Amino acid sequence: MSSVASPRPRLIRGPVGLCGVLTLATAAVFAVNVGEMRTPVLLLWLAAPLGALVAFVSLNAVARREDLLDVTRRFFRHLSVGVLLAFAGSLVNIFDTLVRGMPATYVSAAAGLGYAGAIVTNVFGMARLPLKLAGRGDVLRVGLDAMVVLLAAGVFSWHYVTRPVVESAGWSVSALASGGVILGANLLALFAFGKVAMAGRGHLAPGVLPMLAIGMLAGTVLSSAQQFVADSPWLSSSQLALPVAMLAAVTAARTQVRSATAGNQPRRTSRRLPVWLPYVAIAAVDALLINCIADGNGDALTVAAVAVVLTGLVVARQQTVFRDNAGLVARLDHGATHDTLTGLPNRALFTERLDAALTADDSDRPVSVALIDLDDFKTVNDTLGHGIGDALLVAVAERLAATIRKEDTVARLGGDEFVVVLDGIDPDTALAAAHRMIAALAEPVVAQGHELLVRASIGLADGRSGEDAADLLRRADIAMYAAKHGGGSNVERYTDGMAIAIADTAALGAQLQHAITEGQLFLMYQPIVALEGGRLRGVEALVRWAHPTQGIVPPVQFIPVAERTGLIVPLGDWVLREACRQLAAWRDELGDRAPGVLNVNVSARQLREAGFVERVAEILAESGLPPHRLTLEITESTAVALGDAVTRLDDLRRMGIRIALDDFGTGQSTLTLLHELPVDQLKLDRSFTQGTDTSRRDTMPAAVIALAEAVGLDLVAEGVETEDQAARLAGLGYQHAQGYHFAKPLSASAIGEMVVAQPQPVAL
């Protein structure tokens, strides 16, 4: 909001002082002329148009101030238009009195139109002041409350103010018009007070609305005094009421300007009319009706009709309250039993439905529980943010709900954990349903522009009606952890003894941490050879664990544990540092005959870890190994799970490190990955190397080598175990391979012996 210089204070104080002088002078002239006309009639009317002009100039100046809110300027613009219409009405009044010789109380159609326009414009301006209302129901209730209060006030104004004025003037047309103006001013004053009560200091300076309301109320009170000067036709209550209203308007304008000049910002608060106010209004109208009936007053029928209308309005208001309350109760009930993010049943409703299934009358009714936990969901939250994590949870909820029957229940227990109650189906059908869930989640999820691969572990527990719900869920939980320990993204059914195996795996994780720091790990090296001549080209580092009591623990047992516990980060650092140290040692010992390239596997968790690129650079510097001698291998699933961390592969390549895509051909986004990932080498998965279908076994290897040559990538075939496989791959154009046909993983010393035994050094 831009700021402009405020008008000089005297330009604001001047109008207030001028209107005050005009009001006091008019009051004095009015008093002098009571009972007998002692001054020119023009003096009685002069203050009305002059005060209106002064008020118009003041209000319009406020409406044009650029340092005020748009809502505030719009309100004062409406007031200025209303004052201009009142100015026109007063001029017509003066013309009718001085030129046409009509009584001062006479209100012609033109004058009435001006005064009515002023009232309507002011009401419209006040109505447009914003209120903080919560929904359509709240708006309707506030509107009904306002109608009740205004209607009740209107009937009181008619009975005690407007009717006596009209009766004193003999029920003439002009008297009716004058009475209508008085009634409108009364309601406008009440409307202004209502806005004060409800809007608070939302958009106007403190004191603006109260000042306007006081001015309207004072004008109304003065107008009601017309009955006391009925014998003086040259006098009209409008001669006093208009200057008072204009004085209130310019005072309100000055209040707003002073507040803006002082830099005060209105507080955006809002209030409500008291809930008891409509009932008080009805009670007051009923009391007025009783009084009219007791006095035999002619207004009894009018008041009775108003009482009936008020009762209908209050009944309508209560109906909206009942409807909104019913909706609120329904929402509260739903919120108590459903997850707010996904809309699925929560733990409470799941427990209720599982209990109902297990307590069914059918004593042999099968009931299965599938517990689903997303793999690596925490990584999504940590790397991409909770917004994308929430979008992923919603997508998972929708897919799970689409795979089950109407009579089944899918619920969210919390975090990334979901559960499904499969009621009334046999165990084999329940297992098939769990596999459908895995298949439904296998398709990548697009969340806010990120393509995410969803992997889930499902534990399935089968039971019968009559069993304990908590025990069935516990078994599903154990089976789910077994699925995770098996590598994730699969289904495990609970079996006896599974809990012991899970406990053993958990203990293995604790022991692995000690193994990393206490020297229980060692490396073996899988040779990578040239298919032509069988010469050593490089090695792939493979970690092993020499457990003090269990002997050699294979990687398939402890790598998944390391992934789940986060130990994969220190474990991976140890492998990389030790492998680089060993290649540097071979280079010192064997010179140019040393393995030319070192391949080391890295996980998505390592790549997402802050400072990974810097640690790799540090390890290379410590070992003195040139970066181009190091190749980091990632799997397709690792690449998909990287998210924005894929940029770290670019950083590594800029250092000179090569990137290999391992197990190529087993993922779901192969071509997409080749287009998006900074890859230097493909490693053909062993499933294609060892194909047994002779009619098709060469199809995929041939297609992959064509693809690699087209995009300029190196190619290594994995899992070569026979001479026939090696010859076939060489015939297709493959140059390098690894597998048991050439050598099993060897120790560092055995690799040295293998190099020495070769007739020629490795050609780089």
Image (tube, rainbow, N blue to C red):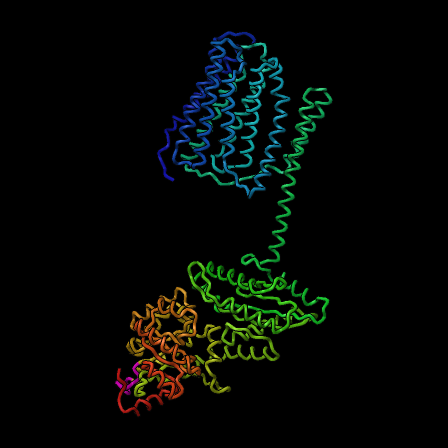
In the rendered image, the vertical position of residue 399 relative to residue 711, given as above or below: above
Q: Nearer the viewer, residue 532 or 65?
A: 532
Q: Which residues are magenta?
A: 587-596
- The residue depicted at 59 percent of the width and 77 percent of the height is 499
Given residues 680 and 204, the one toward you in this image is 680
* Magenta span includes 590: yes
Q: Quadrant of residue 743?
A: bottom left
Vertical placement of 234 versus 542: above or below? above
Residue 576 in view: no
In-front residue for pair 218/316: 316
**Would you place residue 446 above or below residue 714 in this image?**
above
Can residue 705 be seen at all in this image of the molecule? yes
Query: Could you tell me which quadrant the C terminus lies in?
Result: bottom left
Q: Residue 540 sits in which quadrant?
A: bottom left
> At which x and y percent is residue 348?
63, 61
Q: In the rendering, at what x and y percent does residue 419 appear? A: 58, 66
Residue 158 in the image: x percent, y percent? Answer: 62, 22
Total marks shown come to: 0
Which residue appears farthest toward the front when viewing the image? 695
**186 left or right, relative to 577:** right
Q: Is residue 358 above or below residue 77?
A: below
Q: Main secondary structure of the magenta part?
A: helix
Residue 106 location in percent, x, y? 54, 14
Is 574 in the magenta? no
Q: Tell me what residue is drawn at x 66 percent, y 71 percent.
A: 366
Question: The N terminus appears in which quarter of the rendering?
Answer: top left
